[in-house]
Image (cartoon, helix red, strand yellow):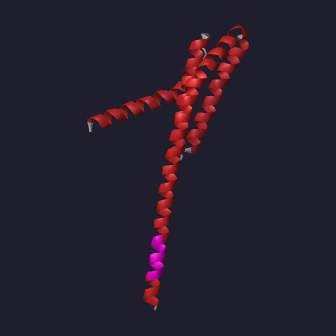
Amino acid sequence: MKKLMYLAAVIAAGLFLVSCSGASIKPSGDPEKDAKALMDYQFQATKDIQEAFGNFELSKAKKIGEDMEKVSKQFEDFYAKNADLKDKFDAAMSSLSGEYEKKLEEMGQGLVDALGGIFSDTEKKADEAVEAVEEAAEAVEDVTE
């Protein structure tokens, strides 16, 4: 029980930090550090969107997506104004992209599996409901005969 409560506290703290991170992540001027920070932020936000979709919290997913766009635009604008650093930032983003693409593919497969589970459960429940209605209709038919 203590482990479960500890895990819940850790998850809650992580979600709190992620919810606050949109406002705190800003370009520092260090292209490598910024690329890593932006990629980490985007990856975590993508995970949060996946979780929101999994919980059918569409407005939350939309808000996270909007925040992601704002943060990305901050970095784009910063490096557009600092052309001497832009190439280094782009190179750092490019070098990290393979690692993050692999993580996103794995996460995407997790979403597909989760949604498949949700919809297979829904389909099973729908089949059970249809079966129950058919049984009820047969029972009514038997009574009326």
Extreme residue in the top direction: 84
Q: Which residues are magenta?
A: 131-138
Where residue 89 sits, quadrant-wise, is top right
Extreme residue in the left direction: 1
Please give left or right for residue 69 compared with residue 141 in the image. Answer: right
The answer to whether any part of residue 120 appears in the image is yes
Instruction: Say which of 42 and 94 sits in front.
Output: 94
- Which residue appears at 63% of the width and 33% of the height? 66
Q: Residue 6 appears at what percent x and percent y?
A: 32, 32
- Which residue appears at 56% of the width and 18% of the height? 36
Quadrant location of the N terminus in the rendered image: top left
Q: Residue 64 appears at what percent x and percent y?
A: 58, 34
Work out whether 34 lies above or below 139: above
Q: Residue 135 appears at what percent x and percent y?
A: 45, 76
Q: Decide whether residue 132 is among the magenta residues.
A: yes
- Which residue appears at 48% of the width and 80% of the height? 137
The answer to whether any part of residue 48 appears in the image is no
Q: Residue 10 appears at what percent x and percent y?
A: 38, 30
Work out whether 66 lies above or below 33: below
- Which residue appears at 43% of the width and 88% of the height? 143
Q: Decide whether residue 130 is among the magenta residues.
A: no
- Dominant SS type (magenta): helix
Count the marks: how many? 0
